[in-house]
Amino acid sequence: MIVADRKKIPEIRDMIQGHDRVLLVGCGTCVTVCLAGGEREVGIIGAALRMSLKLVGRGHVVVDQCTIERQCEDAFIDILAQRVSQYDAICSLGCGAGVQTLAERFPQKPVYPGLNTQFIGILESQGVWTEKCLGCGHCRLGEFAGVCPITRCAKRLLNGPCGGSREGKCEVNADTECAWQRIYDRAKALGTLDRLDAIAAPHDWSTGIEGGPRKVVREDQCIAGLGPKS
Ligand code: SF4
Ligand code: SF4
Protein backbone atom coordinates (compact mmCIF):
# COMPACT_ATOMS: atom_id res chain seq x y z
CA MET A 1 0.00 0.00 0.00
CA ILE A 2 0.96 3.66 -0.30
CA VAL A 3 1.61 4.81 3.26
CA ALA A 4 0.86 8.40 4.24
CA ASP A 5 0.40 10.35 7.43
CA ARG A 6 -1.54 13.49 8.04
CA LYS A 7 -0.14 16.96 8.17
CA LYS A 8 -0.58 18.89 11.41
CA ILE A 9 -3.91 20.69 11.68
CA PRO A 10 -2.37 24.24 11.81
CA GLU A 11 -0.47 23.45 8.61
CA ILE A 12 -3.65 22.38 6.81
CA ARG A 13 -5.52 25.35 8.26
CA ASP A 14 -2.89 27.79 7.00
CA MET A 15 -3.18 26.36 3.49
CA ILE A 16 -6.97 26.67 3.28
CA GLN A 17 -7.84 29.64 5.48
CA GLY A 18 -7.81 32.17 2.62
CA HIS A 19 -10.84 30.47 1.07
CA ASP A 20 -14.49 30.71 2.13
CA ARG A 21 -15.70 27.24 1.18
CA VAL A 22 -13.45 24.21 1.25
CA LEU A 23 -14.25 20.61 0.44
CA LEU A 24 -12.20 18.04 2.33
CA VAL A 25 -11.97 14.89 0.20
CA GLY A 26 -10.92 11.53 1.61
CA CYS A 27 -9.94 8.41 -0.31
CA GLY A 28 -11.24 4.92 0.41
CA THR A 29 -8.19 2.92 -0.59
CA CYS A 30 -4.53 2.96 0.65
CA VAL A 31 -4.88 5.99 2.92
CA THR A 32 -7.94 4.44 4.55
CA VAL A 33 -5.99 1.27 5.32
CA CYS A 34 -3.08 3.26 6.79
CA LEU A 35 -5.52 5.32 8.87
CA ALA A 36 -4.52 8.66 7.33
CA GLY A 37 -7.24 9.83 4.94
CA GLY A 38 -10.30 7.56 5.00
CA GLU A 39 -13.85 8.42 6.02
CA ARG A 40 -13.04 8.32 9.74
CA GLU A 41 -10.00 10.60 9.41
CA VAL A 42 -11.88 13.01 7.14
CA GLY A 43 -14.48 13.38 9.92
CA ILE A 44 -11.86 13.93 12.61
CA ILE A 45 -9.73 16.33 10.56
CA GLY A 46 -12.80 18.24 9.37
CA ALA A 47 -13.95 18.84 12.96
CA ALA A 48 -10.43 19.79 14.09
CA LEU A 49 -10.05 22.20 11.17
CA ARG A 50 -13.34 23.94 11.90
CA MET A 51 -12.26 24.41 15.52
CA SER A 52 -8.82 25.62 14.51
CA LEU A 53 -10.26 28.11 12.00
CA LYS A 54 -12.52 29.53 14.74
CA LEU A 55 -9.52 30.02 16.99
CA VAL A 56 -7.77 32.19 14.39
CA GLY A 57 -10.89 34.26 13.66
CA ARG A 58 -11.78 32.45 10.42
CA GLY A 59 -14.80 30.62 11.82
CA HIS A 60 -16.92 31.61 8.83
CA VAL A 61 -14.88 29.34 6.53
CA VAL A 62 -17.07 26.40 5.54
CA VAL A 63 -15.28 23.05 5.64
CA ASP A 64 -17.42 20.22 4.30
CA GLN A 65 -16.27 16.69 3.76
CA CYS A 66 -16.76 13.59 1.66
CA THR A 67 -14.86 10.43 0.79
CA ILE A 68 -14.66 8.72 -2.57
CA GLU A 69 -13.54 5.19 -3.34
CA ARG A 70 -10.33 6.19 -5.16
CA GLN A 71 -8.89 9.62 -5.91
CA CYS A 72 -6.40 8.25 -8.43
CA GLU A 73 -9.07 7.18 -10.91
CA ASP A 74 -11.14 9.56 -12.93
CA ALA A 75 -14.27 7.36 -12.90
CA PHE A 76 -14.57 7.76 -9.12
CA ILE A 77 -13.93 11.50 -9.30
CA ASP A 78 -17.03 11.83 -11.53
CA ILE A 79 -19.10 11.44 -8.36
CA LEU A 80 -17.46 14.60 -6.97
CA ALA A 81 -17.66 16.78 -10.05
CA GLN A 82 -21.01 18.47 -9.38
CA ARG A 83 -20.30 19.02 -5.72
CA VAL A 84 -16.90 20.61 -6.32
CA SER A 85 -18.51 23.51 -8.19
CA GLN A 86 -19.96 24.70 -4.85
CA TYR A 87 -16.52 25.18 -3.27
CA ASP A 88 -13.60 27.60 -3.67
CA ALA A 89 -10.95 24.99 -2.95
CA ILE A 90 -10.33 21.31 -2.28
CA CYS A 91 -8.18 19.80 0.43
CA SER A 92 -7.33 16.23 -0.50
CA LEU A 93 -6.67 13.54 2.05
CA GLY A 94 -5.50 11.20 -0.69
CA CYS A 95 -1.89 10.32 -1.48
CA GLY A 96 0.19 12.53 -3.78
CA ALA A 97 -1.28 10.76 -6.81
CA GLY A 98 -4.81 11.49 -5.63
CA VAL A 99 -4.07 15.15 -4.98
CA GLN A 100 -2.65 15.55 -8.49
CA THR A 101 -5.51 13.69 -10.14
CA LEU A 102 -7.97 16.08 -8.49
CA ALA A 103 -5.83 19.06 -9.55
CA GLU A 104 -5.84 17.89 -13.16
CA ARG A 105 -9.53 17.17 -13.15
CA PHE A 106 -10.48 20.54 -11.64
CA PRO A 107 -8.08 23.05 -13.25
CA GLN A 108 -9.96 26.07 -11.88
CA LYS A 109 -9.81 24.92 -8.24
CA PRO A 110 -6.90 25.24 -5.86
CA VAL A 111 -6.16 21.75 -4.49
CA TYR A 112 -4.17 21.33 -1.26
CA PRO A 113 -2.55 18.21 0.23
CA GLY A 114 -3.75 17.27 3.72
CA LEU A 115 -1.35 14.32 3.94
CA ASN A 116 2.34 13.67 3.57
CA THR A 117 2.78 10.68 1.31
CA GLN A 118 5.61 8.55 2.65
CA PHE A 119 6.33 5.25 0.89
CA ILE A 120 5.21 1.87 -0.41
CA GLY A 121 5.01 -0.32 2.65
CA ILE A 122 3.12 -2.61 4.95
CA LEU A 123 1.39 -2.61 8.31
CA GLU A 124 4.15 -4.02 10.52
CA SER A 125 2.13 -4.04 13.72
CA GLN A 126 -0.81 -2.04 15.02
CA GLY A 127 0.01 1.62 14.35
CA VAL A 128 3.39 0.92 12.73
CA TRP A 129 4.03 0.97 8.97
CA THR A 130 7.38 0.24 7.35
CA GLU A 131 8.83 0.81 3.91
CA LYS A 132 9.39 -2.23 1.70
CA CYS A 133 9.73 -1.06 -1.89
CA LEU A 134 11.10 1.98 -3.71
CA GLY A 135 9.32 1.17 -6.94
CA CYS A 136 12.65 0.89 -8.76
CA GLY A 137 11.02 -0.62 -11.85
CA HIS A 138 13.37 -3.63 -12.01
CA CYS A 139 12.49 -6.01 -9.21
CA ARG A 140 15.28 -8.23 -7.92
CA LEU A 141 13.62 -9.76 -4.88
CA GLY A 142 14.24 -13.20 -6.38
CA GLU A 143 18.01 -12.69 -5.97
CA PHE A 144 17.76 -11.64 -2.33
CA ALA A 145 15.49 -14.24 -0.73
CA GLY A 146 12.50 -11.91 -0.95
CA VAL A 147 14.05 -9.05 1.04
CA CYS A 148 14.79 -5.81 -0.83
CA PRO A 149 18.28 -4.46 -0.05
CA ILE A 150 17.66 -1.46 -2.30
CA THR A 151 14.88 -0.27 0.01
CA ARG A 152 15.78 -1.84 3.32
CA CYS A 153 19.58 -1.66 3.53
CA ALA A 154 20.54 1.86 4.60
CA LYS A 155 23.52 1.74 2.19
CA ARG A 156 21.72 -0.11 -0.61
CA LEU A 157 24.39 -2.77 -0.62
CA LEU A 158 23.82 -5.58 -3.10
CA ASN A 159 26.75 -7.83 -2.29
CA GLY A 160 26.49 -8.52 1.39
CA PRO A 161 26.45 -6.55 4.60
CA CYS A 162 28.60 -3.61 5.54
CA GLY A 163 29.93 -5.27 8.66
CA GLY A 164 28.34 -2.84 11.08
CA SER A 165 25.27 -4.89 11.86
CA ARG A 166 24.81 -5.76 15.53
CA GLU A 167 22.32 -8.33 16.80
CA GLY A 168 20.35 -8.08 13.60
CA LYS A 169 20.05 -4.30 13.71
CA CYS A 170 21.35 -1.76 11.21
CA GLU A 171 24.34 0.32 12.26
CA VAL A 172 22.73 3.41 10.74
CA ASN A 173 19.62 3.12 12.88
CA ALA A 174 19.31 0.69 15.75
CA ASP A 175 15.52 0.71 15.39
CA THR A 176 15.82 -0.85 11.94
CA GLU A 177 16.49 -4.45 11.12
CA CYS A 178 19.63 -5.09 9.09
CA ALA A 179 18.30 -6.06 5.67
CA TRP A 180 21.30 -8.30 5.05
CA GLN A 181 20.71 -10.17 8.29
CA ARG A 182 17.15 -10.80 7.07
CA ILE A 183 18.42 -11.86 3.64
CA TYR A 184 20.91 -14.25 5.24
CA ASP A 185 18.35 -15.73 7.67
CA ARG A 186 15.79 -16.30 4.95
CA ALA A 187 18.27 -17.75 2.48
CA LYS A 188 19.53 -20.10 5.20
CA ALA A 189 16.00 -21.22 6.04
CA LEU A 190 15.29 -21.75 2.35
CA GLY A 191 18.53 -23.67 1.80
CA THR A 192 19.65 -21.15 -0.84
CA LEU A 193 22.65 -19.56 0.89
CA ASP A 194 24.94 -20.65 -1.97
CA ARG A 195 23.09 -18.31 -4.32
CA LEU A 196 24.42 -15.38 -2.32
CA ASP A 197 27.97 -16.34 -3.34
CA ALA A 198 27.33 -14.99 -6.83
CA ILE A 199 28.34 -11.37 -7.42
CA ALA A 200 25.19 -9.29 -7.76
CA ALA A 201 25.26 -7.02 -10.79
CA PRO A 202 25.00 -3.26 -10.31
CA HIS A 203 21.42 -2.17 -10.25
CA ASP A 204 19.86 -0.93 -13.47
CA TRP A 205 18.58 2.49 -12.47
CA SER A 206 17.38 3.32 -15.97
CA THR A 207 13.90 2.17 -14.89
CA GLY A 208 13.95 4.41 -11.80
CA ILE A 209 12.42 7.82 -11.15
CA GLU A 210 15.55 9.82 -12.08
CA GLY A 211 14.58 10.04 -15.75
CA GLY A 212 11.25 11.67 -14.91
CA PRO A 213 7.79 10.20 -14.29
CA ARG A 214 7.29 6.67 -15.50
CA LYS A 215 4.41 5.11 -17.36
CA VAL A 216 3.02 1.58 -17.68
CA VAL A 217 1.13 0.85 -20.89
CA ARG A 218 -0.84 -2.38 -21.34
CA GLU A 219 -1.90 -2.18 -24.95
CA ASP A 220 -4.06 -5.30 -24.56
CA GLN A 221 -6.08 -3.39 -21.96
CA CYS A 222 -6.41 -0.12 -23.87
CA ILE A 223 -9.75 0.79 -25.42
CA ALA A 224 -9.62 1.21 -29.19
CA GLY A 225 -9.42 4.89 -30.04
CA LEU A 226 -8.50 5.91 -26.47
CA GLY A 227 -5.23 4.08 -25.93
CA PRO A 228 -1.65 5.04 -26.79
CA LYS A 229 -2.17 3.98 -30.41
CA SER A 230 -5.02 6.42 -31.01
S1 SF4 B 1 13.89 -4.53 -6.13
FE1 SF4 B 1 12.86 -2.62 -6.77
S2 SF4 B 1 10.73 -3.23 -7.26
FE2 SF4 B 1 11.67 -4.92 -6.08
S3 SF4 B 1 11.08 -4.50 -3.95
FE3 SF4 B 1 13.10 -3.54 -4.26
S4 SF4 B 1 12.68 -1.43 -4.90
FE4 SF4 B 1 10.77 -2.60 -5.09
S1 SF4 C 1 23.90 -2.71 9.00
FE1 SF4 C 1 22.84 -3.98 7.49
S2 SF4 C 1 21.08 -2.74 6.74
FE2 SF4 C 1 22.50 -1.37 7.84
S3 SF4 C 1 23.76 -0.52 6.24
FE3 SF4 C 1 24.87 -2.29 7.06
S4 SF4 C 1 24.21 -4.02 5.77
FE4 SF4 C 1 22.79 -2.35 5.35
Image (spheres, rainbow, N blue to C red):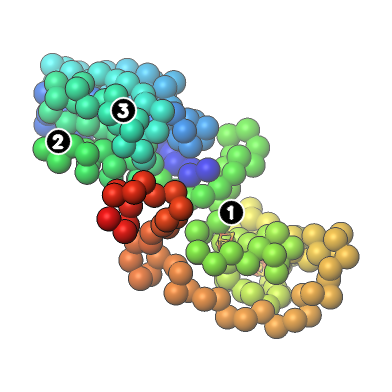
Q: Quadrant of the C terminus?
A: bottom left
Q: Which mark is residue 109?
A: 2
Q: Residue furthest front?
A: 224
Q: Are marks 1 and 2 in contact (CB under 8 Å)?
A: no
Q: Is mark 1 within 8 Å of ligand 1?
A: yes
Q: CA distance from mark 1 to mark 3?
A: 27 Å
Q: Residue drawn 38% across and 70% down?
A: 210
| Picture quadrant of ligand 2 | bottom right
User: Is any atom of residue 160 visible in this view?
Assistant: yes
Q: Which mark is residue 132?
A: 1
* Residue type at the position of mark 2: Lys
Residue 202 pos. (x, y %):
58, 80
Q: Which mark is residue 124?
A: none
Q: Residue drawn 63% across and 53% down?
A: 175
* Residue type at the position of mark 1: Lys
* Residue type at the position of mark 3: Val
Disc with the residue nearer the chain's start (1 vs 2) = 2
Q: Residue drawn 39% across and 49% down?
A: 222
Q: CA distance from mark 1 to mark 2?
A: 35 Å
SS of the residue under disc 3: strand
**Residue 127, located in which quarter of the rendered image?**
top right
SS of the residue under disc 2: loop
Q: Is residue 95 above or below residue 156?
A: above
Disc with the residue nearer the chain's start (1 vs 3) = 3
Residue 48 pos. (x, y %):
32, 21
Number of residues whose C-alpha sits closer than 10 Å to that of mark 1, classed few (under 14), some (14–19) or many (20 or more): some
Q: Which residue is mark 3?
A: 25
Q: Residue drawn 36% across and 38% down?
A: 73
As drawn, is 61 to the left or to the right of 128?
left
SS of the residue under disc 1: strand
Residue 198 pos. (x, y %):
75, 81
Q: Is residue 127 above or below residue 58?
A: below
